Each structure stands twice: as C-alpha cells, then as structure tokens.
Image (tube, rainbow, N blue to C red):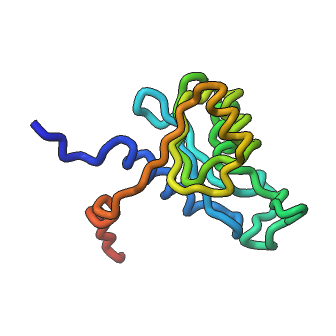
Amino acid sequence: MTDKRIPWNQYFMLQAVLLSLRSTCERLSVGAILVRDKRVIAGGYNGAVSGDDHCIDVGCYVVDGHCLRTIHAEMNAVLQCSKFGIPTDGAEIYVTDFPCLQCTKSLLQAGIKKIYYMRNYHNDDYAIRLLKRKKVAVEQVKVEPKYLNTVSINIAEN
C-alpha cells in the first residue's frame, strides 16, 4: 500500500514556512519548528522581544549589518521550550533558512540532533565545521510545489 500523504519533511517544512509569515523583521522572514518523535514541540519566527517595538512598525535597528531588535526563529523556538519546561535534547529543527553561527551554537547546546533547512542563507563556514565536529546531521529540504497547490481553504464570508 502506497502512502499518499505528504512526506514528513515536507509537512514540517511547510509549517516552518507558515510560521515565517508571522515574522516582524523586514529584512528576512524566517520560521522554525522543533520536532521530537514526529511531533511539534515548539515553533518560532524572527521578531522583537514580546512587548518591544516591531521592525515592521518602526524599522529595523541595524548595527554592523545585523538587526539588534530581532530574535531569530530558531532561538524563539528553543526559548519557548525553555519557558515551558520542554526538553530539546534529541529534537530536530525545521527552519526556512540555514541557521546563523549564533543559532547553530545554541542549537548544538540545546542538544538538537538534526537540522533541516529550506534555503541557504550566508552559510557560515565555522557553523558548518561545528555541525560536522558534533556529528549533527544537516539536510536541505525543497518544498515540492505540488504540496503548495493541493491545499485549498474556503472561507465563507459572514
């Protein structure tokens, strides 16, 4: 019997893409989903600290080419686990863009065992070396257009 459902990698990556739509940073919209045993344990997107101004409202706060206001999607997902007491050791992450060096280091410290990403984005050489040294698997996931085209939602207007 053939499984006609969407493959897990596509399913979780599309959830990360959906979360990226909540991003409040104008420079790049990123979403991340932490998964353990094929279950989502947390999600995050890049944006300001809760209660602070958002880049989409007042512009990015850029110093040395980086927006200081924004917490990256990967960190928001890990911090959500920390806030609610959810272990991250042994989890996997699906993120729309290859993690920056700081996020890579944080993911390693959090015990993430595999990183799935959709797009390359300034892939840091040291981050790649760290991932290899720590034997953390990294896999690029391309979202197949057929999965984007098969979902339709009809919302009746009141």
- Which residue is pictured at 42% across the width and 54% down the height? 142
Give the residue at x 48% y 29%.
36
Image x and y of residue 92, in percent? 52, 33
Q: Is residue 145 left or right of residue 107?
A: left
**In this view of the protein, which residue sits in the foreground, 96 or 15?**
96
Q: Is residue 38 above or below residue 10?
A: above
Left or right position of 57 against 152? right
Vertical placement of 154 versus 30: above or below?
below
At 65% from the left and 49% from the top, the residue drawn is 73
Foreground pick, 18 / 53: 18
Residue lying furthest bottom: 157
Q: Residue at x 76, y 42 (%)?
A: 102
Quadrant into which the N terminus falls: top left
Estimate the x, y position of residue 81 in percent, counting from the top left.
Answer: 63, 32
Residue 47 image-quadrant placement: bottom right
Quick one: which residue is furthest to the left in this view?
Answer: 1
When the figure is inspected, residue 95 is found, relative to residue 138, above or below; the finding is below
Does any portion of residue 50 appear in the rendered image? no
42 left or right of 28 in image: left
In front here: 120 or 7?
120
**Quarter in which the C terminus is drawn:** bottom left
Can residue 126 be seen by looking at this rendering? yes
Q: Which picture quadrant has residue 82?
A: top right
